[in-house]
Every structure is written in structure tokens, then in C-alpha cells.
Amino acid sequence: QVQLVEAGGGLVQPGGSLNLSCVYRGSAFSLWAMGWYRRAPGQQRELVATITRGGYPVYEDFVKGRFAISRDNAAKTGYLRMNSLSPEDTAVYFCNLRTGIFGNIDWATDAGSWGQGTQVTVSS
């Protein structure tokens, strides 16, 4: 019933930027939060950034100062702006939607709805 569609991935040179988006379709939610994750080849999925239902961003240390997460409630869209990209950022990036929020979210779980992922490749 809920479909998430990521976009904005691609090939970029080191030091470049990309802007990812995640649109959810099919349902309307009064309360929602979104997280961005990534999975590099041969690696476990890792959390990148989250944004609360109130629009408060939280970043993992390895992206602080480089990435910016935001949301547009009217457009039902979450964004991840990535700057100063390096080859270590190469991964498939996934968005995750959480609804029915009554308290703190455990972002370490596989709960919620997931997008298909968008490939980000940083290479010279």
C-alpha cells in the first residue's frame, strides 16, 4: 500500500555533490519520520541520517558537515543532500519511512517501509 521511490543517484567525481529524494505514494500519514541508510559492497547496512516528524535532523558522525537531510511534508518527500563526496561514500542508498510514531524510533531495526534504493558511485 505504501510505495517509496528514491531518485538522484548516479556517478560523481570525488568532491562532488548529489541530491537524493524519496517520495512516498499511496497513503497519507499525519505523522512520519524518515531515515536514510546505505549499503556498500560487502558491507552491512548502515544508518546515514534521520529526520524526525518535527523536522529535526540527526547525522551519523561520518557525514556530519557534509550531508543535509530535509523534508517537505506537502510533497511527501524526504531529501538527502550529499556534499564533498568521496569513494568511501559509494553505496546503494535507501530511504525508510516510519509512521504511527508515539515515541522514540529505533533506527537499528528493519521496521517501516523501504524504497528500492538508488546507486551512488563516487569515482574519478
Image: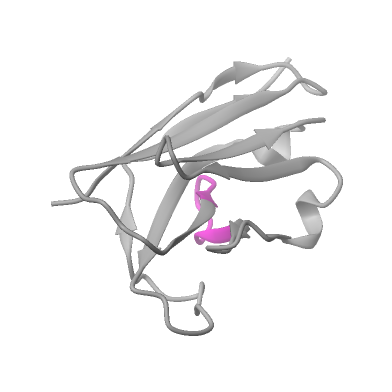
Residue span colored magenta:
38-47
Q: Residue at x 73, y 16 (%)?
A: 13
**Front residue of this view, candidates 37 and 39:** 37
Position of 83 relative to 112 (above/below): above
Q: Report x, y in % for residue 74.
A: 43, 39
**Front residue of this view, candidates 45 and 77:** 77
Q: Report x, y in % for residue 33.
A: 48, 61
Q: Report x, y in % for residue 120.
A: 55, 30
Is 35 a magenta residue?
A: no
Q: Residue at x 35, y 67 (%)?
A: 99
Position of 102 relative to 73 (above/below): below
Q: Residue at x 41, y 55 (%)?
A: 96
Q: Residue at x 77, y 31 (%)?
A: 83
The secondary structure making up most of the magenta span is: loop
Q: Check the picture and name the quadrant holding the C terminus.
A: top right
Q: Report x, y in % for residue 61.
A: 80, 61
Q: Is residue 1 left or right of residue 73?
A: left
In the image, farthest residue toward the right: 65
